Image (cartoon, helix red, strand yellow):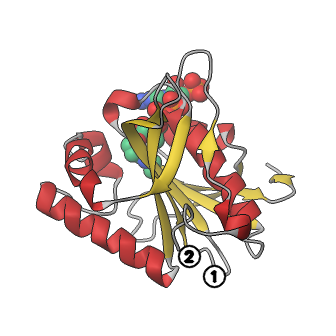
Amino acid sequence: MDATHDTGPRAVRPEADATASAPALLLRPWRVEDAAGVAEAYRDPALRRRASATVRDETEALRRLRTRHDGRETGERLAFAVLQARPDGGGEGRSAGHVVLKAPHGPEPEVGYWTAAPARGRGVAPRALGALTHWAFTALPEVTRLRLLHTAANTASCRVAERAGYGFEAELLPAPTEFPSEGHLHVRTVSGRAPA
Ligand SMILES: CC(C)(COP(=O)(O)OP(=O)(O)OC[C@H]1O[C@@H](n2cnc3c(N)ncnc32)[C@H](O)[C@@H]1OP(=O)(O)O)[C@@H](O)C(=O)NCCC(=O)NCCS
């Protein structure tokens, strides 16, 4: 399930071009050596508030990475580390965030993401999400429609969705305990933006 070791359509490597103010982004499967960086990212209260998992230290980060590895093995979740490309073109630089494709082989695949606090405000999430989306529609022919859910109060996430071409589709009522507050459903289809 490692996109970087496949041949055929899956070998398309998800990445995003540099912008005038931000480096290019490279996406690859998470590795155990990323644990320290994940633990550091989860020290941010905003990420802890929004994330579904609890990561309090490097041990828990390692456990999380093993879960991500298992999810990749079973095909239930395809998670990618998002890294800034080195300005000299010499490969991976600083870790910037995370994107995930949940249940890619099910009827309603869903995307998720976060950006590490120091990397925020430079379009990392919409660009990484755009790269993941392009990869999913290219490498996984059965994926033709992707869902994105966020809490209604998360206006930054709403912007990320819109900028990555996920049109607003519906307001969602709270559904405790997994979704205790109102949410938004955004959708992007393989043929273009979903109608608003
Ligand atoms: C939401 C998040 C992923 C955005 O990542 P990012 O890489 O900083 O994305 P951007 O740089 O494109 O910023 C997102 C947009 O939200 C805006 N924004 C940022 N913080 C905001 C805030 N507190 N309120 C409103 N808008 C905000 C930015 O100005 C930008 O809008 P623009 O495109 O109009 O300029 C990041 O803040 C994050 O990881 N938050 C914690 C985890 C999370 O919420 N994940 C999503 C769960 S659905």
Residue 157 appears left or right of 62: right
> Given contact means CB atoms under 8 Å apart, are the residues at marks 2 and 1 in contact?
yes
**Mark 2 lies on residue:** 103
* Image location of residue 32, percent across then percent down: 27, 61
Residue in the foreground of this view, choosing between 105 and 15 = 15
* Image location of residue 87, percent across then percent down: 49, 22
* Image location of residue 125, percent across then percent down: 52, 40
Q: Residues within 10 Å of mark 1 (few under 14, many from 20)?
A: few
* Image location of residue 33, percent across then percent down: 25, 55
Relative to 17, say whether 5 is above or below.
Answer: below
Residue 119 appears left or right of 11: left
At numbered mark 1, what does the secondary structure look like: helix, strand or loop?
Answer: loop
Residue in the foreground of this view, choosing between 98 and 16 = 16
Relative to 19, say whether 12 is above or below.
Answer: below
**Mark 1 lies on residue:** 106
Question: Which amino acid does the dot numbered 2 rest on?
Answer: Ala
Question: Which amino acid does the dot numbered 1 rest on?
Answer: Gly
Residue in the foreground of this view, choosing between 21 and 1 = 1
